[in-house]
Amino acid sequence: TATIIDGKAHALALRTRIAAHVATFRQSTGRAPGLAVVLVGEDPASAVYVRNKGKATRDAGMESFEHRLPADTDSATLLALVASLNADPAVDGILVQLPLPAHIDAQAVLLAIDPDKDVDGFHPVNAGRLAIGAEGFVPCTPLGCLMLLQDVHPQLSGLEAVVVGRSNIVGKPMAQLLLQQSCTVTIVHSRTRDVAAHTRRADIVVAAVGIPHFVKGDWIKPGATVIDVGINRTDAGLVGDVDFASACGVAGAITPVPGGVGPMTIACLIRNTYVSACRRDAVEAGL
Ligand code: NAD
């Protein structure tokens, strides 16, 4: 059966490593890296994410600035807050928690964030930088997936990778990262004629679909590495996009849900914020 990839342990190790770097950064610059998190409204899942991000930020020795705005906040107010965070020298990273209420143009808000403080990597400038291989910020979830993959495959070059899903926050940046590592990358999506035919020849499958148990064990090549990004709330609790029970018997290595990709996402946010502070102060990040 498959090796279980322990995302929790990887994430803890990364956060500990970043915390040590942050301590050195504070000593040499006399300031702490800062992450501003903006939450509009009372979506319970978002509130949990924001709380966890704040705690992880402080645990790493960084400063957390949390802005909670009522659900009826208008676009102008939110854009004014983003502008003030862009201008604030104590803020190295800005994150606006999605989804935003329907009356706010989320794309306009993401566009307003200074790309050099966009630690979520959602700004089109950072998407473009990733596409051309320039320095920028890579979205945290696919970055975390890449780190887990690199641990299993120190050499990704030449491997067949299939990414299931083409969202801007997971599927597309994941494919870009794998391409950068010289994988042969296929993206499959809702209009793909035969998803299983593609996944069956993959050395690496990354599932980011948002459908519980979508990828079955018999869609996987024996020995392949399977990264399950899915977080689906069902009556049976949190489940991934991969049918873990059947995939386990076939895959060589697989991430569980929970405890796989999820913890890596926050750890990468901490990493990106530290990297942003280093760039802004022209300090070597040492990662
Ligand atoms: P999304 O809904 O934006 O995108 C889903 C993608 O799946 C789409 O591109 C679509 O083309 C594809 N798809 C839909 N039906 C399909 C089908 N039948 N066959 C093939 N492809 C199909 O979702 P997302 O934001 O990319 O998130 C995907 C999953 O990952 C969700 O479960 C989400 O909760 C989870 N997620 C987890 C984290 C984390 O930190 N672990 C972060 C972001 C998202």
Image (cartoon, rainbow, N blue to C red):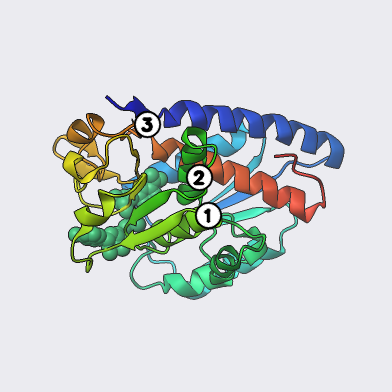
Mark 1 and mark 2 lie on one chain; the one further toward the N terminus is 2
Mark yes or no: residue 96 visible: no
Label 3: which residue? 259
Q: Amino acid at mark 1?
A: Ser
Q: Amino acid at mark 2?
A: Leu
- Marks 3 and 1: in contact by CB < 8 Å? no
Which quarter of the rendering shows the C terminus? top right
Mark yes or no: residue 229 visible: yes
Give the residue displayed 54% in from the left and 37% down from the top: 154
Give the residue displayed 33% in from the left and 39% down from the top: 224
For the residues labelled 1 and 3, the Cα–Cα distance comes to: 28 Å
Q: How many marks?
A: 3
- Marks 2 and 1: in contact by CB < 8 Å? yes
Q: Residue 132, position in %: x, y?
A: 60, 68
Q: Residue 55, position in %: x, y?
A: 53, 35
Quadrant for ligand 1 reads bottom left
Label 1: which residue? 182
For the residues labelled 3 and 2, the Cα–Cα distance comes to: 23 Å
User: Residue 93 versus residue 157: which sits nearer the camera?
Assistant: 157
Q: Residue 234, position in %: x, y?
A: 17, 42
Mark 1 and mark 3 lie on one chain; the one further toward the N terminus is 1
Q: Amino acid at mark 3?
A: Gly
Local secondary structure at mark 2: loop
Give the residue displayed 83% in from the left and 34% down from the top: 27
Q: Is residue 225 above or below residue 68?
A: above
Which is in the foreground here, disc 3 or disc 2? 2
Q: Which mark is residue 156?
A: 2
Mark 3 and mark 2 lie on one chain; the one further toward the N terminus is 2
Q: Is residue 201 above or below residue 222?
A: below
